[in-house]
Each structure stands twice: as structure tokens, then as C-alpha cells.
Amino acid sequence: MKAWIELQRNNALVKEWCVMWGEQFRSGDILPLLCDQDGGEGYLCDDCAYDPQNYASRLRKRAEVLESEAAKLRHLADIGVQPPDMTPRLMLEAELLLENPEGELP
């Protein structure tokens, strides 16, 4: 079964991530959702949603980027990640408190 694009009414005009392009976009009143038989896959920007001749090439390009990122993450998992030294964090927190003694976030 082919995937499809479902158009939804959007009640919250916020930034979303385009699953086909991988970039953030500001959603409009109508929000395209890429779906397949397993459910929603993610939102699409208007450029991707309404350009059917480029669906396959954009999805393949996005898959290549995600596969590359996944390989990098697997590599980090294999070699391990050293946790940060907490001394600089404590010093930075102390500096922030001196700049803002009431503890309010900037």
C-alpha cells in the first residue's frame, strides 16, 4: 500500500520538522502529515507536500542523511563517551549566580 499525505487543520502555528527535507518550517493553517499503514510518520513543509514529482528523490536523500547520522551515533556508542568534568560546570553555575543573584534564568 502506498503512503499518503493527510491534510490536517492546524490550531497551533509553531515550527515543525519536515520529515522529507529534514529542516524546520513554520506551520500554516493546513498541516500536511505523511502517513503509511502504521500511522503518521511526520509533518511535511508545503514545498515537499505539494511537489509530488520529487517525493522519491527527497525521501532517498533524507534516508542517506539519517543513515549517515545513525552510523556516527553507532560509532560513538561503540567507542564510549567520556562524561564531562563537573568542576567547570560548578564554576559556570557560580558565575551565573553572581550575574543574577536572584536566581532567575536569563
Image: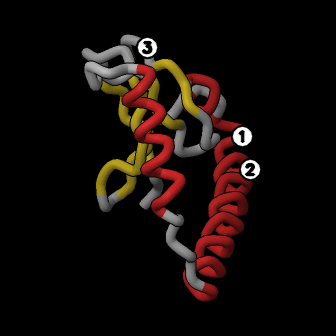
**Quadrant hosting residue 31:** top left
Q: Amino acid at mark 2?
A: Ser
Look at the picture and state if 36 lies above or below 31.
below
Examine the rendering and report whether any part of residue 73 can be seen. yes
Task: Name which of mark 3 and mark 2 comes first in the sequence.
Answer: 3
Pinpoint residue 43: horizontal percent, then vertical percent: 44, 37
In 3D space, how far apart are the residues under numbered discs 3 and 2 (Cα atoms)?
24 Å
Q: Amino acid at mark 3?
A: Gly
Compared across the picture, whether 81 is left or right of 56 comes to left
Quadrant in the rendering for residue 21: top right
Q: Nearer the viewer, mark 3 or mark 1?
A: 3
As rendered, which of 12 and 2 lies closer to the eye? 12
Q: Amino acid at mark 1?
A: Asn
12 up-or-down from 37: above or below: above
For the N terminus, give its image quadrant: bottom left
Residue designated by label 2: 57
- Image coordinates of residue 93 in percent, x first then y, are 42, 40
Residue at horizontal 60 percent and vertical 72 percent from the top: 73
**Is the image coloured rainbow, by chain, by secondary structure, or in one colour?**
secondary structure
